[in-house]
Amino acid sequence: MRMLIAVALLIVVPFPLAAQTAPAPVPSAAPAPFVPPSPVVFDLPEAASRGSITLSSTILAGGVVPEASSGNGGNVSPDLAWSKPPRGTKSFVLLAEDPDGNRDGAPVRHWMVFDIDPAARALPTGVQPGLAVPRMTQALNVRGAIGYAGPRPRAGTTHHYHFELFALDTRLGLTDQASRAAVVAGLAGHVLAKGRIIATYTGTEPEPAQAIVRPAIPLARHSRISA
């Protein structure tokens, strides 16, 4: 009788099931860290000034860099004109920078011109890059060329381009290979007045793919190649 009761209990009462552990949650990808825009030269302490210059441009009047002045278009530098500088001005410095395109902790440099003649009041559209323009010195841009390099952000992204003009009481006397840091150091204590224009540009084409350079494979001695 006791054996029958034990068998019945085994049938009615099931063995406890093994505890099932819930799958570990899959961690979600961390969002990309926010990279604040880098300060342009205009906002650096080295460029401090009590005076101001009115900078204008017919091409940039709408606050947008036109396609013709972009790196995807004609890469034509915009026209710029400025008001009379303070007495004692001996040269101008012009910079075009993109603080949204951080490059090694600094804005992307699209144009850098210095030792502009103090009698100048404007630059025409389409200043020729890579050439020795009289009464001014153009330096290297972000693409390693002399002169203006138009905007070319990634497709769908909008960047801000600061065209900055500084009136100095000196000449920098730098070469066309000068760095941005050298120009900034030359501004310190010499800026009589400054002005700027900010214009935007939205990328329309992806950046060109980098060419893959494969190392040459040495040929075995006495081997022959057919073409």
Image: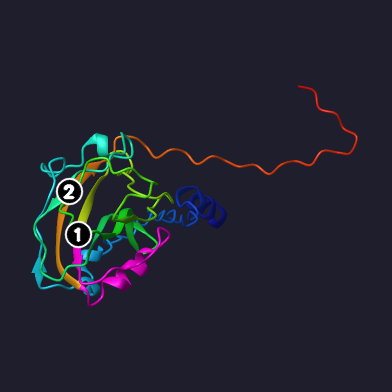
Q: Is residue 143 magenta?
A: no
Q: Quadrant of the N terminus?
A: bottom right
Name the disc covering residue 165, or none: 1
| 64 relative position to 100: left or right | left
Mark 1 and mark 2 lie on one chain; the one further toward the N terminus is 2
Q: Look at mark 2 in the image and give the residue it sits on.
A: 80
Which quadrant of the view contains residue 216? top right
Q: Secondary structure at mark 1?
A: strand
Percent of width and height locating residue 225: 81, 27
Asked whether 69 or 212 is in front, the reply is 69
Residue 104 x/y as whole percent: 40, 62
Q: Residue 101, can we see it?
A: no
Q: In whole angstroms, how far apart are the C-alphas of marks 1 and 2?
A: 10 Å
Q: Amino acid at mark 1?
A: Leu
Q: Nearer the viewer, residue 22 or 2?
A: 22
Can residue 160 be seen here? The reply is: yes
Task: Name the outermost residue toward the top.
Answer: 227
Amino acid under disc 2: Leu
